[in-house]
Image (cartoon, rainbow, N blue to C red):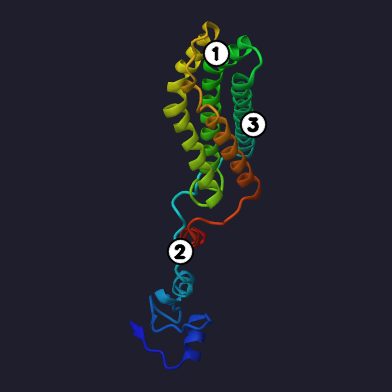
Amino acid sequence: MIVPIGSAGEATRRTGTSGPHPARSVAVHGAGDQRRCEPDPSDAPGAAVTSQTPERRSAPAASRWRLPRSWRRATLVLHVISAGAWIGIDVIVAVLVLTGWFGAEVNVRSLAYRALAEFVVWPMLGSGLACLATGVVLGVGTAWGLVRYWWVAVKLALNLALCILIVVLLVPGMDAVGAYGEHLLTGTPSSTQVERLFFPPAVSLSVLTFATVLAVCKPWGRLRRSTARREDR
């Protein structure tokens, strides 16, 4: 049978419990004075904690991928080496072009143009692509990103543009440069084949120097501030 409770104090004495939630009814089982209370479901500890605990924000499904420290350092070393090799090859191109223009002997001038046509362009393209690939890996695998900061995005665009210029403009003209070097020995050269060779090393060295300054100074801040604020949240 169900015994109604007259007061909270009497309920406490009968149930033997204390707390902020008084029992609403007492169920009597069996005979005599032995009485057992059926606990109210709202008195359970878990119920109170659940009702008072605010909802937590769900964590992101997966964190952004990052390069391990050792791999990041190795990639950075390769990036610096490839950029340095690219600059060195541009210097060699400038020396060969100036030698071909102002050399005192025809044999030296011819050798400079033939060496330029045979040995320089493909190593230049290889170092440029290596610099581009390692730069992309560093951007994706570190907090700098590819298009998160201005200096990184500008460096990436300059690197890609120089590689395209090598493939589109410089490589197709190397056969004519080699032929010009051979024609110097026969005395029938055509100057129109090499009169623009000054521009590739001049433009490439200027752009690579500017990219080096960007890598050291890291100017201009973030490219997209609104995106950065959303990521920080």
Residue pictured at 44% horizontal, 68% vertical: 55
| Up-down relation of residue 42 to residue 117 (above or below) | below
Q: Secondary structure at mark 3?
A: helix
Mark linked to residue 84: 3
Q: Which residue is mark 2?
A: 57
Crowding at mark 3 (Cα within 10 Å: few <14, some 14-19, many 20+): some
| Up-down relation of residue 37 to residue 132 (above or below) | below
* Residue type pointed to by label 1: Arg
Return the residue nearer the eye: 227 or 45.
227
Res. 193 visible in picture: yes
**Alpha carbon of mark 3 to alpha carbon of mark 2: how far?**
47 Å
The location of residue 130, given as percent across then percent down, is 54, 29
Q: Which residue is mark 1?
A: 114
Q: Earlier in the sequence, mark 1 or mark 3?
A: 3
Check if mark 1's residue and mark 3's residue have beta carbons within 8 Å: no
Q: Earlier in the sequence, mark 2 or mark 1?
A: 2
Return the residue nearer the eye: 164 or 204.
204
The location of residue 149, given as percent across then percent down, is 53, 52
| Up-down relation of residue 16 to residue 5 (above or below) | above
